[in-house]
Image (cartoon, helix red, strand yellow):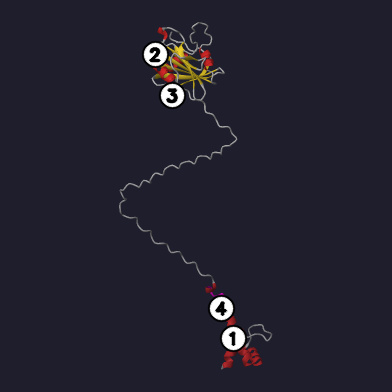
Amino acid sequence: MSRVRSAAVLRTFAPYPGGATGVFSGETAQRAVRNLGIKDMSKLILTASLLAVLAIAACSPAAAGPSATPSVPSGPSSPPSAEPPSSAPPETPAPVPPATPTPPAQPAPDPSDAPEIPDPAIVEFTPGEIFLVDGIVRDLSDCEPVRGTLLPEAAVAGIECLAENPYVARVGFYLFDNDEEMFDHYVARMESEGVTLDQGSCFDGVGDGQYIPGPDEVLSRHGCFITAEGVANYRLLLPGAHVYVGIVGQNIDPIELEDFAFLGSHDTPGFPTIWGNPGA
């Protein structure tokens, strides 16, 4: 019974003696079984079975790649909210302050550069100061106002000028309201320097006197002194115009200052030529 089943199977898959496979008739298969023996027969059956399984697997539709899975549509999106929009106004962002620009870096000054000298400020002269400037009749320049604590007490206006003279450092002109205040200031200044009225002269280095003699010309006077620092000073009164003149020298010789005040005067007694009343 087993031999008959084996023979039937080998009808389809029994190999040739050389190793090739083919289809045999029943006699040929029986002869081949006898020649191969039971053990070889079992090997042949196992080999044939494996080949049959591989052949079936190769022809099966399952060997094809997996079919594409149809995409499942996603569920509907969530419905919009039924709540009404908020009535609150939108928040206004806080204002951002503008950024302060960084100033450009300044180059370090070169120590060898000469410092810049600013232009002198333009000073407006008062009417009293203009009156004093207009009365100058000599070679004076660079006149500037004298104000504040530098102005003599009771004076209402003052100017100081430079002189083009080797003996003169500067000349000051001071305006008073009247002759009495002008004379009081003159007396106080002379006494502070140790000068006694109507004594001495500029030839002596220290002195005071009238440049026009007579009892009616008491206010027409002048005087000289030398400061503790060794600087010659000359003082002159011009009554009627209420002008007090002060001249500061370059050295200790006050007679040069008197000559400067009377320069060009040929009268005897002479009259100062350094200033004249512009309203006369």
Which percent across, then down, holds residue 100? Answer: 46, 41
The quadrant of the image that shows the C terminus is top left
Element assignment for label 3: helix
Q: Considering only order in the chain, which callout, 4 or 1, is on the residue closer to the N terminus?
A: 1
Quadrant assignment, res 72: bottom left
Badge nearest the viewer, 1 or 4: 1
Element assignment for label 4: helix
Say which of 32 and 121 sits in front. Answer: 121
Q: What amino acid is at disc 3?
A: Leu
Badge nearest the viewer, 3 or 4: 3
Crowdedness near tag 2: few (<14), some (14–19) or many (≥20) residues, C-alpha within 10 Å? some
Residue sitting at the far bottom = 1
Work out how far the residue at label 2 is from the one at label 1, CA to CA, in angstroms.
Answer: 159 Å
The disc at residue 56 is: 4
Crowdedness near tag 1: few (<14), some (14–19) or many (≥20) residues, C-alpha within 10 Å? few
Q: Considering only order in the chain, which callout, 3 or 2, is on the residue closer to the N terminus?
A: 3
Crowdedness near tag 3: few (<14), some (14–19) or many (≥20) residues, C-alpha within 10 Å? few
Crowdedness near tag 4: few (<14), some (14–19) or many (≥20) residues, C-alpha within 10 Å? few
Q: Considering only order in the chain, which callout, 3 or 1, is on the residue closer to the N terminus?
A: 1
Q: Which residues are magenta?
A: 55-61
The image shows residue 192, relative to residue 266, as above or below, that is below
Q: What residue did someone put label 3 on?
A: 150
Q: What amino acid is at disc 2?
A: Asp
Q: What residue did someone put label 1 on?
A: 46
The image shows residue 76, relative to residue 98, as above or below, that is below
Q: What residue did someone put label 2 on?
A: 179
Q: What amino acid is at disc 1?
A: Leu
Circles 2 and 3 in contact, beta carbons < 8 Å: no
Circles 1 and 3 in contact, beta carbons < 8 Å: no
Badge nearest the viewer, 2 or 1: 2
- Can you see residue 178? no
Identify the residue at image location x=62%, y=91%.
39
